[in-house]
């Protein structure tokens, strides 16, 4: 009897403690959920701190350890679970207040959630406490190379070689901080700069550069892209999300650590603001030198270059060497040789025209084909073997800031090739032709005409003539002008090769 009584008491005690523990778990539902929420806030903060530390560390050349990555992964997994529990808890709270009759079901849910919350809370605490491991390991980045070699074919011609020597001297001269290389489209500015870049690896200078940075730019300049190109060369990681200003500050800091720098900006279409980018310049000692290649002298002016080197078209003999080198043995054939020389001459020294024409005539031994090509070139209606030449010039043409400049340029194609046009005469023709309008006096119109000529010269669409006060249109550009006026109706001009002009401009 005693033992039965004892058993009953024991069962009763167990039942009581079981019910009591369940009731207390249920009673602590809100408390457990709140603790869970609090721990979740703590761990999210901690995770953000660790992530921030990692991104700063990365910029300094450090990388997170395996343990750090694992910790972050665990936190993210747990966060998802916690978010689900918190959401469910909020829902059961809402239904118990709206539908009191679901009280029993809710109590079951809350009991379950309370249990899970307690368990998750412990896990969160453990993760928080375990975050004292070493977070980084140093990643050794490859040492910064003085020069990154660029793919560039060797020069043909003595003049190009001389220009390279001249540039090397300018870079070695402390008086010149910014150097401009300018000239018409496809004349060889980039090739010159690339050869210079490659040469700097081996050349001995008084104060050699400790890094040469090549930056390719495009017509639509992307400042962040330019910053990234520079940063990459000095092993600096920039965050794409950061503002241009912040990136500029960090870039400037890093570049100033270098003793002597050279930055080459290739194919610049408009002024690049070095301050906005975070590129040091004009420090008085010219420790950071800037080289710019552009089609427009105005870009050099705007960027305040100290000296500008003009790249001109090739001279006859050099043009022939380039042509013959590409066209191959066929030009040595007795009948072909004189025609080939003339074809090369018709490319007016523009390397791209020479190259494309030579490629299109290589392996063509039939003399008739050479005669035909020459005839077409003389009529200026052949596109030098490919549309590429005119396409590249089109960019310069459409970059002219007004239609008046288009018309004035096209007008020049009425003059014969290699003809030095008197600037004053040209302006009077423009005025008489109704191209320059909207001026009160003849003097105003004349001055405006001279300004237009200068603009065309600075954009390499016209060049100095043989005598003072004259200008010329380059043979390839003349061909291009004739081509554009007959192929693009909106040009407002219709020029024909026979030098007659019908203008419907204005
Ligand atoms: N002296 C040279 N010898 C051999 N090839 C040359 C020479 N000059 C230029 N070229 C070739 O002519 C083509 C045009 O040159 P490049 O791209 O350097 O011109 P660019 O002046 O930079 O043109 P853009 O104004 O369009 O930037 C290239 O294929 C280049 O290799
Ligand atoms: Mg170029």
Image (tube, rainbow, N blue to C red):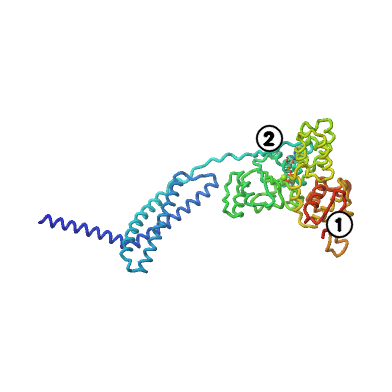
Q: Where residue 57 sits: x, y (%)?
A: 52, 47
SS type, badge 1:
helix
Which image quadrant for residue 210?
top right
Q: Where residue 396 sits: x, y (%)?
A: 75, 50
Q: Is residue 18 left or right of residue 326?
A: left
Q: Nearer the viewer, mark 1 or mark 2?
A: 1
Whether residue 280 can be seen here:
yes
Image mark count? 2
Vertical arrangement, residue 383 with respect to residue 446, above or below: above
Q: Is residue 128 left or right of residue 379?
A: left
Q: CA distance from mark 1 to mark 2?
A: 52 Å
Please tell me which residue lies in front, 434 or 482: 482
Please tell me which residue lies in front, 437 or 71: 437
The residue that mark 1 highlights is 430
Within 10 angstroms of label 1, few (less than 14), some, or many (20 or more) residues? Answer: many
Q: Where residue 78 sits: x, y (%)?
A: 41, 53
SS type, badge 2:
loop
Which image quadrant for residue 155?
top right
- The response on whether ligand 1 sits within 8 Å of label 1 is no
Q: Which mark is residue 202?
A: 2
Which image quadrant for residue 451?
bottom right
Whether residue 306 can be seen here:
no
Residue at left 16%, top 58%?
A: 9
Q: Quadrant of the C terminus?
A: bottom right
């Amino acid at each position: 009897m005693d033992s039965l009584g004892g058993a009953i008491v024991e069962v009763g005690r167990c039942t009581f403690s079981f019910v009591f523990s369940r009731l207390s778990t249920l009673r602590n539902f809100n408390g457990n959920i709140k603790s869970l929420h609090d721990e979740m806030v703590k761990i999210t903060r901690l995770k953000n701190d660790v992530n921030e530390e990692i991104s700063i560390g990365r910029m300094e050349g450090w990388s997170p350890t395996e343990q750090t990555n694992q910790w972050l992964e665990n936190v993210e997994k747990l966060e998802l679970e916690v978010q689900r529990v918190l959401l469910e808890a909020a829902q059961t709270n809402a239904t118990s207040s709206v539908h009191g009759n679901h009280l029993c079901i809710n109590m079951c849910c809350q009991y379950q959630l309370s249990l899970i919350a307690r368990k998750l809370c412990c896990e969160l605490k453990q993760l928080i406490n375990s975050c004292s491991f070493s977070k980084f390991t140093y990643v050794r980045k490859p040492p910064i190379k003085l020069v990154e070699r660029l793919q560039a074919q060797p020069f043909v011609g003595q003049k190009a070689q001389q220009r390279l020597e001249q540039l090397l001297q300018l870079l070695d001269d402390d008086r010149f901080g910014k150097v401009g290389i300018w000239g018409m489209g496809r004349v060889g500015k980039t090739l010159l700069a690339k050869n210079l870049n490659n040469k700097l690896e081996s050349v001995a200078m008084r104060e050699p550069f400790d890094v040469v940075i090549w930056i390719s730019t495009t017509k639509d300049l992307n400042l962040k892209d330019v910053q990234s190109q520079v940063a990459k060369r000095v092993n600096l990681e920039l965050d794409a999300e950061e503002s241009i200003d912040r990136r500029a500050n960090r870039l400037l800091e890093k570049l100033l650590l270098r003793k002597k720098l050279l930055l080459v900006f290739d194919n610049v279409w408009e002024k690049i603001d070095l301050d906005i980018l975070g590129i040091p310049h004009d420090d008085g000692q010219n420790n950071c030198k800037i080289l710019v290649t552009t089609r427009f002298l105005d870009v050099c002016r705007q960027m305040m270059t100290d000296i500008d080197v003009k790249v001109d078209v090739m001279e006859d003999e050099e043009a022939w060497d380039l042509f013959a080198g590409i066209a191959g043995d066929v030009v040595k054939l007795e009948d072909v040789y004189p025609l080939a020389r003339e074809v090369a001459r018709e490319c007016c020294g523009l390397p791209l025209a020479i190259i494309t024409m030579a490629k299109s005539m290589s392996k063509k031994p039939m003399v008739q084909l050479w005669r035909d090509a020459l005839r077409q070139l003389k009529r200026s209606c052949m596109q030098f073997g490919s549309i590429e030449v005119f396409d590249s010039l089109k960019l310069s043409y459409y970059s002219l800031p007004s239609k008046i400049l288009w018309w004035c340029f096209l007008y020049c194609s009425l003059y014969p090739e290699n003809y030095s046009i008197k600037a004053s005469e040209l302006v009077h023709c423009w005025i008489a032709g109704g191209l320059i309008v909207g001026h009160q006096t003849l003097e105003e119109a004349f001055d405006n005409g001279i300004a237009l000529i200068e603009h065309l010269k600075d954009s390499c669409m016209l060049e100095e003539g043989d005598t003072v006060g004259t200008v010329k249109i380059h043979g390839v550009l003349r061909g291009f002008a004739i081509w554009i006026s007959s192929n693009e109706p909106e040009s407002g001009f219709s020029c024909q090769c026979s030098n007659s002009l019908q203008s419907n401009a204005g």
